[in-house]
Image (cartoon, rainbow, N blue to C red):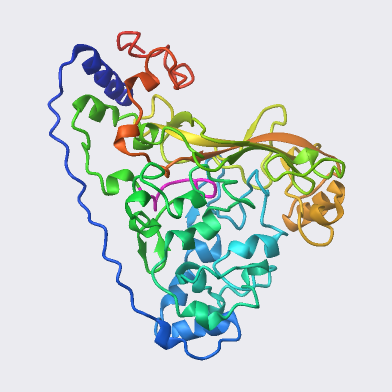
């Protein structure tokens, strides 16, 4: 009720014109750091034959870096132990064991998925996570623009590794984007607000990055632990990044807008659309994969992956969000007659910690065990994988075994959804949403779905 009261107070001020007693806005208490960095070219004068040779050379000076890196989710693909809503036992959840509705699971598909691992050689379960020389320093620090990782995270063998190593410095947007812009197997597949247009953006594309900010300016890093939370693999926000880390409240000159902050996330007004330059995937139907007669188009159909829908210049979907999510875990039973939410946002109109947030929602049709009513992640790559033999039965049998699941042998297709909170592609204040974006005819908000009887401003401030 306190949350609702904040919204209604703001609406009342909008109607009456009476200002509140809020203090004036406070300027952001931060400055972008200077970015001078040591020229490393004198330290890599000899030929380096293997990527591990590069790491050993780095560790001669940066003695603690590998040990620090090996405790992080970027290395382990697991977060800290957490309690998952609806599950009794604490769980370490991460990319290593979380299902998604894109390429479904890394289990059994490591060699192809670990192209984006911050290490070398993770091709199967025998990978040694304690081997410091397998930490990939270059993927985050090189600036040559030539460094390319392939199967199991190993770089192209034709690369002059010493030449690449001579360019190292602090991570640039390109370093982060080489994996995060292409998650899910292609450009802008997963994230609707991260793609290569942000490598050199205008202020209209993203007011922060277009003003010179790097990823690491917001995602601050200490001992190789990078702040930030991906709710595709996390269930809470203990290491999150917030607008208020820099923008001290109340940030607006108009007190009516400031009062909205009790119930509306900054992103809701300041990210009016996403996928503004490049289209993002919004729907994926795996059941259509394997048809050799269809014309292939990476934005519509691929034989190995099925049928897609991409969207461009999209309006977000909106919902209450308290910075935590529900989570489907491997082996959880589903109701195949309804949409299976893999990470539904938690919070509602009665939750004082929840705010209205913008989301990209990715919907997909994925395989499940008809008799056991559980999602089955298939093997996709390699011998026996669907991309190799185009045999769902075999791919699901292998995938179930790799995931420790029993498989009845009978499979069907389940409808699923994943929710991606939007926080990038923040627009300049001149392009933020205005009152009539959400109130009055043509509102982009579904007030009934948010728990209201209708548009609060039209109901005189009553729910």
Judged left or right of residue 129, residue 336 is: right
Judged left or right of residue 78, residue 150 is: right
Q: Is residue 156 visible?
A: yes
Is residue 215 in the magenta section? no
The residue lying at 12 percent from left, 33 percent from top is 23
Q: Quadrant of the N terminus?
A: top left
Percent from the top left, x then y, of residue 236? Answer: 45, 46
Is residue 238 in the magenta section? yes
Q: Residue furthest top?
A: 459
Q: Is residue 345 visible?
A: no
The relative height of residue 9 versus residue 358 in the rendered view (above or below) is: above
In the image, 337 versus 220, the foreground residue is 220
Percent from the top left, x then y, of residue 162? Answer: 52, 83
Q: Which range is magenta? A: 230-241
Tag count in the figure?
0
In the image, 174 versus 348, the foreground residue is 174
The residue lying at 57 percent from left, 71 percent from top is 119
Judged left or right of residue 172, residue 233 is: right
Q: Residue furthest bottom?
A: 46
Judged left or right of residue 158, residue 216 is: left
Percent from the top left, x then y, of residue 129? Answer: 57, 72
Main structural element of the magenta stretch: helix, strand or loop? loop
The relative height of residue 3 versus residue 329 in the rendered view (above or below) is: above
The relative height of residue 64 versus residue 78 in the rendered view (above or below) is: below
The residue lying at 35 percent from left, 54 percent from top is 218
Q: Quadrant of the C terminus?
A: top left
The residue lying at 86 percent from left, 47 percent from top is 393
Percent from the top left, x then y, of residue 197? Answer: 48, 49
């Amino acid at each position: 009720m306190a949350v609702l009261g904040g919204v209604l107070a703001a609406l009342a001020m909008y109607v009456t014109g009476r200002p509140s007693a809020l203090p004036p806005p406070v300027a952001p208490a931060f400055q972008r750091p200077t970015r001078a960095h040591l020229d490393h070219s004198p330290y890599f004068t000899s030929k380096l034959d293997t990527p591990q040779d590069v790491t050993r050379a780095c560790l001669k000076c940066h003695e603690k870096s590998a040990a620090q890196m090996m405790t992080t989710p970027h290395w382990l693909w697991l977060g800290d132990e957490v309690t998952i809503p609806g599950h009794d036992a604490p769980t370490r959840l991460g990319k290593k064991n979380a299902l998604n509705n894109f390429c479904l699971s890394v289990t059994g598909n490591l060699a192809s998925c670990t192209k984006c691992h911050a290490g070398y050689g993770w091709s199967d379960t025998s990978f040694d996570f304690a081997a410091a020389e397998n930490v990939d320093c270059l993927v985050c620090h090189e600036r040559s623009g030539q460094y390319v990782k392939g199967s199991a995270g190993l770089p192209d063998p034709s690369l002059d590794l010493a030449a690449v190593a001579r360019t190292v410095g602090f991570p640039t947007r390109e370093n982060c984007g080489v994996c995060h812009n292409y998650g899910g197997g292609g450009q802008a597949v997963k994230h609707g607000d991260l793609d290569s247009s942000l490598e050199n953006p205008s202020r209209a594309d993203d007011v922060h990055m277009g003003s010179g900010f790097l990823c690491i300016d917001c995602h601050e890093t200490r001992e190789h632990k990078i702040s930030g939370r991906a709710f595709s693999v996390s269930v809470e926000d203990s290491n999150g990044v917030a607008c208020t880390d820099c923008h001290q409240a109340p940030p607006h000159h108009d007190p009516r807008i400031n009062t909205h902050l009790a119930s509306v996330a900054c992103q809701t007004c300041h990210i009016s659309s996403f996928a503004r330059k490049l289209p993002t995937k919004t729907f994926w139907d795996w059941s259509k994969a394997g048809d050799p007669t269809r014309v292939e188009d990476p934005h519509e159909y691929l034989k190995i992956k099925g049928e897609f829908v991409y969207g461009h210049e999209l309006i977000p979907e909106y919902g209450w969000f308290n910075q935590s999510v529900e989570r489907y875990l491997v082996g959880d039973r589903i109701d195949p007659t309804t949409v299976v939410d893999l990470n539904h946002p938690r919070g509602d109109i009665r939750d004082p910690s929840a705010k209205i947030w913008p989301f990209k929602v990715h919907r997909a049709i994925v395989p499940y065990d008809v008799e056991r009513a559980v999602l089955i992640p298939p093997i996709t790559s390699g011998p026996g994988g669907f991309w190799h033999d185009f045999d769902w039965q075999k791919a699901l049998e292998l995938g179930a075994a790799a995931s420790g699941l029993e498989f009845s042998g009978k499979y069907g297709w389940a409808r699923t959804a994943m929710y991606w909170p939007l926080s990038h592609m923040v627009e300049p204040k001149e392009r933020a949403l205005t009152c009539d974006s959400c109130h009055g005819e043509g509102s982009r908000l579904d007030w009934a779905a948010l728990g209201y009887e209708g548009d609060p401003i039209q109901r005189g401030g009553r729910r």
